């Protein structure tokens, strides 16, 4: 902790050295702030990078509500404490980090453009031209692009082409999936991070990061919906054909269940959270009426001022809120028109997804097959930080290492195809990637 506070009060150097090949992932949520320091080998041969966690830090979030910063000073202190904890564990000073974006009401658009290639072989310059035409159609205004990637290409009307390079035709088309969010909330979050002496190396919309961490390749290709159930928000991501095609964020999460319990049982927020964690369930059992809980009353100084209620009351409060959450998810999917494309698969992740019965309620309301997702493909991840609550942070690190989407920096989109598309072509594809990009 000396290092980062030392920098704040005038020193340019931290307590620990800065090492190359290090990735900082920062998830600023409504309930917690998590920071991963990860080392990647940046291997491109297999299309994936081997990740190893060096440091983990997490603190109770302050100054953030529904994913949006509402108190700059409180949010800064929470971010600073989480980063310092990770730095102390790793023995490394971070200079920059990838941050997750769930604020600014993300919305999704699909842009289709066509450019003339006059019958010659499609090359990297043609792709750049098509991507540029797509960017020109993205209205800037008060919204910022937080995700932009080519979904598929077409040549002379023949669609479904993953990599058109080397092909011939007259018209090259591209379908681009774009997610935008309001600039002001993103700028506030970036400012909090920068005040902790960290540069923002990249921004990733939370549903995409959670999907990278908790989904398998077949799910992304066949169609799947990932629901990241956090404390203040529930993020929705629909994947198809290997790409994120829809992202949305609902301002409802696990904190709302805690508030319902505190109000319904007339107890403190801290005790309501404890009861939710230890005894909370959305599934009733025959013994619920016989299990009596002792509940301290809010504002009472007398330790004997408690109420005694059966566990069934707890279930009766939790279940309607979960049902409402999944009903809102179902409505958003229906409004997007992508419910059928999303397939029959739903993956729940995030801290609130660990509530007993959430999976069963989701399966009933959404009429889909549901499983619980947790971070995968990262070595050195401790059991305490390997649960669903850390999926976003793990996904941010994985995104930075693999670069499987279009990186957004300073308003520009890198014109690079996803690495996994090249990987399907073996050595020839890898050779072509170096030829076109170096």
Image (cartoon, rainbow, N blue to C red):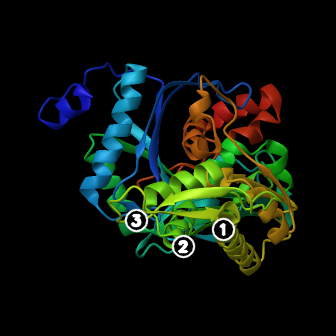
Q: CA distance from mark 1 to mark 3?
A: 18 Å
Image quarter for residue 324? bottom right
Q: Quadrant of the C terminus?
A: top right
Q: Residue at x 57, y 63 (%)?
A: 308
x and y, in percent, of residue 23 in the image? 48, 32
The residue indicated by pointer 3 is: 298
Q: Residue at x 36, y 24 (%)?
A: 88
In the image shown, does 66 or 410 lie closer to the viewer? 66
- Relative to residue 137, is residue 101 depicted above or below? above
- List the residue tagged with mark 1: 313
Distance in Å between CA atoms under marks 2 and 3: 11 Å
- 88 relative position to 37: left or right: left
Tag 3 or tag 2, which sits nearer the N-term? 2
Q: What element does badge 2 sit on?
A: helix
Which residue position holds label 2? 264
Q: Is residue 113 visible?
A: no
Where is residue 302? Give x, y as percent: 35, 59
In which quadrant is the N terminus drawn?
top left
Q: Is residue 383 above or below residue 400?
A: above
């Amino acid at each position: 902790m000396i290092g980062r506070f030392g920098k704040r009060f005038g020193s340019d150097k931290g307590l620990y050295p800065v090492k190359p090949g290090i990735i900082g992932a920062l998830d600023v949520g409504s309930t917690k702030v998590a920071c991963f320091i990860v080392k990647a080998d940046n291997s491109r041969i297999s299309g994936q990078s081997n990740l190893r966690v060096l440091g983990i830090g997490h603190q109770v979030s302050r100054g953030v509500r529904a994913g949006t910063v509402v108190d700059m000073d409180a949010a800064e202190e929470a971010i600073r404490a989480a980063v310092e904890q990770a730095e102390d564990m790793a023995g490394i000073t971070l200079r920059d980090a990838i941050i997750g974006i769930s604020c600014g009401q993300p919305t999704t658009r699909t842009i289709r453009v066509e450019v003339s290639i006059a019958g010659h072989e499609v090359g990297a310059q043609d792709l750049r031209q098509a991507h540029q035409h797509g960017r020109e159609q993205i209205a800037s205004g008060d919204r910022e692009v937080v995700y932009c990637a080519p979904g598929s290409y077409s040549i002379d009307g023949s669609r479904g082409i993953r990599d058109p390079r080397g092909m011939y035709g007259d018209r090259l088309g591209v379908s681009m999936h774009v997610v935008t969010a309001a600039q002001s909330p993103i700028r506030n979050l970036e400012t909090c991070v920068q005040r902790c002496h960290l540069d923002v190396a990249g921004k990733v919309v939370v549903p995409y990061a959670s999907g990278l961490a908790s989904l398998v390749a077949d799910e992304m290709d066949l169609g799947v919906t990932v629901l990241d159930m956090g404390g203040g928000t529930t993020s929705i991501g629909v994947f198809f054909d290997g790409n994120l095609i829809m992202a949305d964020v609902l301002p409802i999460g696990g904190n709302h269940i805690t508030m319902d319990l505190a109000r319904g049982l007339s107890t403190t927020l801290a005790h309501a959270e404890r009861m939710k964690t230890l005894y909370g369930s959305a599934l009733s059992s025959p013994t619920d009426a016989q299990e009596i809980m002792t509940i301290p009353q809010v504002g009472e100084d007398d330790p004997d001022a408690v109420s005694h209620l059966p566990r069934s009351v707890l279930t009766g409060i939790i279940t309607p809120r979960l049902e409402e959450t999944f009903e809102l998810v179902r409505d958003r999917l229906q409004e997007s028109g992508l419910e059928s494309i999303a397939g029959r698969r739903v993956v729940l992740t995030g801290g609130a997804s660990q509530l007993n019965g959430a999976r069963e309620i989701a399966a009933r309301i959404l009429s889909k097959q549901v499983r619980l997702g947790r971070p995968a493909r990262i070595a050195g991840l401790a059991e305490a930080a390997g649960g669903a609550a850390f999926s976003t942070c793990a996904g941010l690190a994985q995104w930075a290492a693999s670069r499987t989407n279009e990186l957004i920096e300073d308003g520009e989109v890198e014109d690079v195809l996803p690495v996994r598309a090249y990987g399907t072509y073996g050595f020839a594809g890898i050779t072509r990637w170096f030829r076109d990009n170096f």
